[in-house]
Image (cartoon, grey):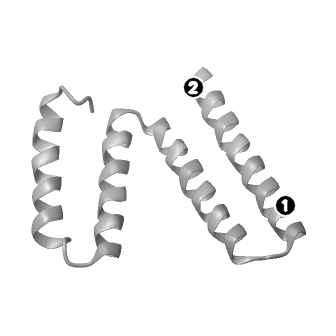
Amino acid sequence: MSLTSFCFLLFFPVVFLLHYLFFSKNKYVQNVFIILASCVFYGWWDWRFLGFWLTAISTYYSGVLMSSTSNINSRKRINIAAIVLNLGIYRQSSTIRIL
């Protein structure tokens, strides 16, 4: 879905109204709704872009895990695992793109 498409002209007001009318009270539900709407938007455009969302989410949670521990070795392991996961997702998405 492109920003200049007719689908987006229908998608955006619906998401905006749902966000404003129903999800404006609870910040957690509001953020989950916006993330899901973004996944629908990017997935509609090209489903392969959803892998990049997975890298963003894994990077965020690896940062949360690293901030919750004070052990340097644990932080290094979490960081290495996040890098390997992100490189694996990137490699998989580029392989799919070639096919």
Q: Secondary structure at mark 1?
A: helix
Q: Position of residue 7 (x, y in %)?
A: 16, 36
Q: CA gap, disc 2 to disc 1?
A: 31 Å
Residue that appears at 84% across and 62% down: 77
Q: Is residue 88 left or right of residue 46?
A: right
- Looking at the rendered structure, the number of numbered marks drawn on it comes to 2
Q: Position of residue 14 (x, y in %)?
A: 11, 53
Residue that appears at 14% across and 54% down: 16
Q: Is residue 22 above or below residue 46?
A: below
What is the three-letter code of the residue carrying label 2?
A: Arg
Q: Residues within 10 Å of mark 1 (few under 14, many from 20)?
A: few
Do labels 2 and 1 touch, CB within 8 Å?
Answer: no
- Extreme top residue here? 98
Q: Please report whichever mark, 2 or 1, sits nearer to the chain's N-terminal start.
A: 1
Q: Is residue 19 left or right of residue 34?
A: left
For the N terminus, the image quarter is: top left
Q: Closer to the camera, 88 or 35?
A: 35
Residue that appears at 38% across and 42% down: 43
Confirm whether residue 52 shows in the render: yes
Q: Closer to the camera, 4 or 60?
A: 60
Q: Residues within 10 Å of mark 2 (few under 14, many from 20)?
A: few
What is the three-letter code of the residue carrying label 1?
A: Lys
Q: Closer to the camera, 54 or 99?
A: 54
Q: Secondary structure at mark 2?
A: helix
Residue 97: mark: 2
Q: Name which quarter of the figure residue 2 lies in.
A: top left
Q: Position of residue 32 (x, y in %)?
A: 35, 66
Residue that appears at 62% across and 55% down: 59
Marks 2 and 1: which is nearer the front? 1
What residue did someone put label 1 on?
76
